[in-house]
Amino acid sequence: MTVRAENLVQNWFPSEDGNAGERKELIKLMEQIISGVDDLKDPNRAHLKGEKNRGEDFYKKLTETSQIPMNGQQAELVNEELLKLLHNHPYHTKYFFTNILPMASTPGILGMLTAMLVNGNNLWDVYGPAGAEAEVRVVSMMSKLIGYDPNMSGGYTTWGGQGAIFSGLRLAIAKAAPESLRKGVPQNLYAFCSDAAHYSLFKSMEATGLGTNNLIRIKTNKDHSMDMEDLRCQMERVAQGGGIPVYIVATTGTTDAIAIDDVKGVRETAEAIAEKYDLKVPHIHADSALGGFFAFFNEYDVSENPLQFSVGVLRMLKEIKAKFQHLSLADSMCFDFQKLGQTPYTSSLFLVKNAADLKRLDLEEQETPYVGHRGYGEYHTGYTLECSRMGSSISMLSVLLTFGVEGYQRLLGQFLEVNLAFREALSREIPQAEVVNDDNVGMATLFRIYLDGSPRFQEEISGEATSMEIERNNELNKMLFEKLGEKRDEMFFGDTTKFLLVNSKEGQEFYLSVSKFFVISPYTLPEHIPHIVSYLKDVIASVCGQFENVHA
Ligand SMILES: *Cc1c(COP(=O)(O)O)cnc(C)c1O
């Protein structure tokens, strides 16, 4: 066994030759971290153990006291310091239901570890051959899953669903105005998405220089999906005014309600308008960051029901299958593996139906003096916005191989079962609460609470509530956020202040504030729902009491 001298710089690195002694050292340090986290776990809370006082001047103090030490410390001591960062950290126990923040699965972590141990650069297969190989495999697997021709399609791993929306917009601009890559972006290009879409497109409009004024928001239907008639009207309005519609984002699984836009309808509308005004068909991106994983049910036999899902979940699956069969009509899409794919951050996949489209964004040979375009190396991603890229594809591959289609069906099916049990119990047990996304399938329930005698959701959305009443209801619901937020180490709920735009009796517009129950932990099971709902019932009763006192 090799024993290293004390002060070698090499001690900070994994071994060169694979010797057992140094491996043992590395594993010992990893074991210290892993068992340190285990010691902090408490399955009855949504946070790890440990004290952390994030008072008002917490970050200010950190700024003042942080300094690089002149002499480095031993790894064991630094590990202790690292573990302290995790004190009172949110942790994905059965009581964790805030938004779509998943636990990193074990195969996901192992994939990342594999990537890190060789630290390849996924920019070029000469630097990161493992990442390139995994990326090509994952792109092919996911293409086949959603019905793209894998011999035509392409894609790459990138920074989030937002990165995918941004890349889609770059493609849209390059397709509509190829000159713009050199001359800058013309100001008469327009993009479209629904009112319920993620703010990523808003950001992208700003970043590409098109400006957010050129983003047209389309009204939503009662189920929060995009209103096709409004899309048609808005596209016509733009075209008649000399504008060119270049990009439509169809959200297939919105971040809040998990509403699913009609991709086929978007395609038909886009083609009809393009023909009428003699324009190119806009690039259509399915923002399937969240919902794309429902495609794992495409081949699920709902009549045989081999995984024995409940009647309620089967009903959801039928709807999911009907909506996702047209996903491949989009020109590009995204799988946010860091969401329902169960990999660590950052790992999102951008898929394009026609890989040749990416060529429009590629760099010329003379622009890449260090890498690519050599006699050696077959795979160079000069079209990505990033230069160096992590090998997150290895993590994706690891989970896909470990779970398989059936594994994803079981996991996502479990999320659906738990959510249905929650919806039913909430409606039954808590009269003040109302489910406001009853029409949406998925693992999220949005709910809003009301005092006795106040107008409720139905009146709010049909314009029968006054401005004062809606404001008052919003205030009550924000009070619930505060209360749930204070106790989030016990149970961690989500919320949003911008769920749905409604008109008051007076014609004033308001967004509704709602709380969110998002099933994302594999540890939450239907049998936990009675306790969760009873906890919620107590908090809601106390908030309502407090609110009535304040407003008495
Ligand atoms: C989360 C989400 C995004 C943004 O994805 P990031 O991975 O956070 O960048 C975009 N669209 C939808 C529908 C999402 O749910």
Image: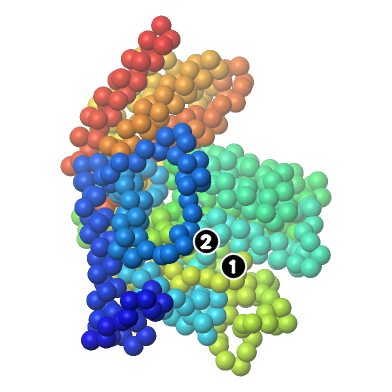
Towards the viewer: 390 or 444: 390
Label 2 secondary element: loop
Q: Which residue lies at the image location 47% right of the left edge and 24% below the top edge?
A: 474
Task: Residue 159: give its label.
Answer: 2
Classify mark 1: residues with Cα within 10 Å, few (<14), some (14-19) or many (20+): few
Question: Residue 440: x percent and y percent?
Answer: 41, 42
Question: Residue 314: x percent and y percent?
Answer: 29, 50
- Which amino acid is tagged 2? Trp
Q: Is residue 379 above or below residue 447?
A: below
Q: Is residue 407 above or below residue 514?
A: below
Report if the CB atoms under discs 2 and 1 are less than 8 Å apart.
yes
Visible residue check, residue 246: yes
Classify mark 2: residues with Cα within 10 Å, few (<14), some (14-19) or many (20+): some
User: Is 321 left or right of 250, judged from the image as shown?
Assistant: left
Note whether ligand 1 is within 8 Å of mark 2.
yes
Towards the viewer: 523 or 450: 523
Q: Is residue 291 above or below residue 488?
A: below
- Which amino acid is tagged 1? Glu
How many marks the image carries: the answer is 2
Location of mark 1 (residue): 386
Quarter holding the C terminus is: top left
